[in-house]
Amino acid sequence: MPEPLSLVVLISGGGTTLQNLLDRIAAGTLHARIVHVISSRPDAYGVQRAKMAGIPTSIIERKSDSSTFSDRVFAAIRSTPAELVVLGGWLQLLKIPPDFQGRILNIHPSLLPKFGGRGMYGHHVHEAVLNAGEHESGCTIHIVNDAYDNGPIILQRKVPVVNADTPESLAARVFEAECEAYPIAIEQVGYALRE
């Protein structure tokens, strides 16, 4: 059995994606370990989730231009043994340095390229899907580049949109798909990087 993949998880909010990864690791369905969590907000509940799990955590707030912010984030990541960086509700644009090209994953709650880009996160996405009259939605895991929701797609999972859907009910269905898909994509990309 290979060594578990070493992950750094970046968060900006409640940490539900972080919790899913922790649960999958505990259940043995994700062969990884989370070595560090970075939050862009000190009040993010995901910070408490990380602390309860005994994971070292850094708070790096955006108080300057994106280049300096990104430099501080990647300096923190480089201080860990991270093989892969996983965005879990991270809401800040990063400038990706050369040594991390292809090593950062994001999960987005729509079938990209639809309903992506600046300002399209959380309930905004699900409202847009419903307002557009879409018959299906889902999630997309992609490699992160220097633009919002724009990198190469690794994996997508589809869910139906039903007539009675609200943004909340659609979000719950999409999150179920995210919980299944993200660990698969993490292992796929992580082990490919080792080859």
Image (tube, rainbow, N blue to C red):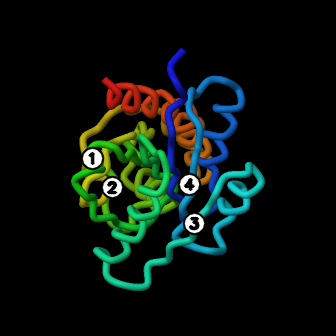
Crowd around label 2: few <14 · some 14–19 · many ≥20 (10 Å): some
Crowd around label 3: few <14 · some 14–19 · many ≥20 (10 Å): some
The image shows residue 161 at horizontal and vertical percentages of: 49, 39
Left or right: 52 in relation to 41? right
Relative height, residue 179 to residue 68 (above, below):
above
Q: CA distance from mark 4 to mark 2?
A: 16 Å
Foreground pick, 138 / 195: 195
- In this rendering, the label closer to the viewer, 4 or 1: 1
- In this rendering, the label closer to the viewer, 3 or 4: 3
Mark 3 or mark 4: name the one nearer the start of the chain.
Answer: 3
Residue that numbered label 2 is attached to: 116
Mark 1 or mark 3: name the one nearer the start of the chain.
Answer: 3
Relative height, residue 139 to residue 55 (above, below):
above
Mark 4: which secondary structure? Answer: helix
Mark 3 or mark 2: name the one nearer the start of the chain.
Answer: 3
Q: CA distance from mark 3 to mark 2?
A: 27 Å
Residue ID at (56%, 33%): 32
Q: Label 2 is placed on what type of residue? A: Gly
- In this rendering, the label closer to the viewer, 1 or 3: 3
Q: Which disc is residue 113 wearing?
A: 1
Foreground pick, 167 / 5: 5
Residue ID at (41%, 38%): 135
Which residue occupies the extreme right position in the image?
52
Crowd around label 4: few <14 · some 14–19 · many ≥20 (10 Å): some
Residue ID at (42%, 37%): 136
Residue that numbered label 4 is attached to: 167
Q: Label 4 is placed on what type of residue? A: Pro
Q: Which disc is residue 58 wearing?
A: 3
Q: CA distance from mark 3 to mark 4?
A: 32 Å
Which residue occupies the extreme top position in the image?
1
